[in-house]
Amino acid sequence: MVSDVVWACVFTAMCWWLGTGVILWLDRLPQQSFRWSLLGWSVLLIASFKGVADSMLEVSVWNAYLAFGSVIVMWGWHELAFLTGWITGPRKVAMSPNAQGMQRFIEAAQVMIHHEIALVINFGILIWMQGDRPNHVAVCTFALLWFMRLSAKLNLFFGVPQNGAQYLPPHLAYLASYFRTRLITPWFLISISAAIGTWCWLVWLTQQGVMAITTGWVMLATLLGLAIVEHLIMIFPWPLERLWGWAMGQADVKNTLTTQPCEPI
């Protein structure tokens, strides 16, 4: 049992680390390569839907791995499509000078609304595929990725001490104008507290015998833990090169820490 839990944790962490690294690497290749990267990943996307469909038929250890891995590939397609600039939004320029309040929010939404719509459509397809099938690992994995990524985007919008703008590739440099560098905001405290609270609640349910420690549960709990780490990186000066230096070697990143002064809350 212990070895099964360890292997599920390792698999989840490797999917997170390797998947992120591959996307960072592809996004830093010459722009002429983007179409081929997207074409190749689109083939994987089709295969991932087949993998998800097969995994939903039965609850088993293998199907948990198949569901989780397939959704990671699926999610990677959306990330690559956004970071290469293929599916973003109608607005592809920097934020208007002195934009505040609702204008700032609308402009930020216009930058990525097509990306968000694509995620909604993808999630809707997964819900339709699920139907009354017993294995829900794929749907839960996609939902967790979506909610935590949305939380991260809102934190970048409201402002965090380390917004990572220095890691943006040249073709997405305009996105930095939509980030804020400021001290911890109430939204960050709410989002990180909700995430940690959810993780603790999941652990408590297993201790009470309400929920079994399955392979799928371990993967989701590990993924949530990694998402919490990603949020904490927004407030601590942790250079991403320490995790993905092999993928970011082509990037001209001279200063790994945010140098802009933090605004007050």
Image (tube, rainbow, N blue to C red):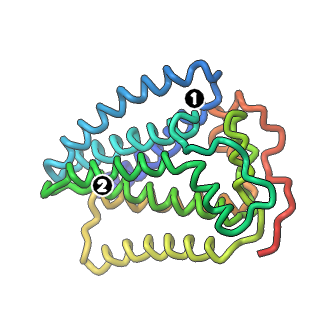
Q: Which residue type does callout 2 highlight?
A: Val
Location of the C terminus (image quadrant): bottom right
Residue farthest along the bottom direction in this orientation: 208
Residue 115, compared with residue 45, is above or below; it is below
**Residue 83: image location, x then y, percent:** 58, 38
Q: Residue at x 73, y 32 (%)?
A: 251
The residue lying toward the viewer, choosing from 42 and 56, is: 42
The residue lying toward the viewer, choosing from 106 and 48, is: 106
Q: Quadrant of residue 154?
A: bottom right
Q: Quadrant of residue 39?
A: top left
Q: Residue at x 65, y 29 (%)?
A: 28
Q: Residue at x 58, y 58 (%)?
A: 153
Q: Bin the neighbour count of mark 2 within 10 Å (Cα to Cα): few under 14, some 14-19, many 20 and up.
A: many
Element assignment for label 2? helix
Q: Which mark is residue 139?
A: 2
Q: Residue at x 35, y 59 (%)?
A: 218
Q: Which residue type does callout 1 highlight?
A: Leu
Q: Which mark is residue 9?
A: none
From this viewpoint, is residue 44 visible? Answer: yes
Location of the N terminus (image quadrant): bottom left
Residue denoted by label 1: 26
Earlier residue among tags 1 and 2: 1
**Residue 162: image location, x then y, percent:** 73, 58
Residue 24, compared with residue 127, is above or below; it is above
Residue 86, compared with residue 130, is above or below; it is above
Q: Quadrant of residue 190?
A: bottom right
Task: Give left or right: position of 129 versus 193.
Answer: left
**Residue 144: image location, x then y, percent:** 41, 59
Task: Give left or right: position of 162 versus 262.
Answer: left
Element assignment for label 1? helix
From this viewpoint, is residue 241 visible? Answer: no
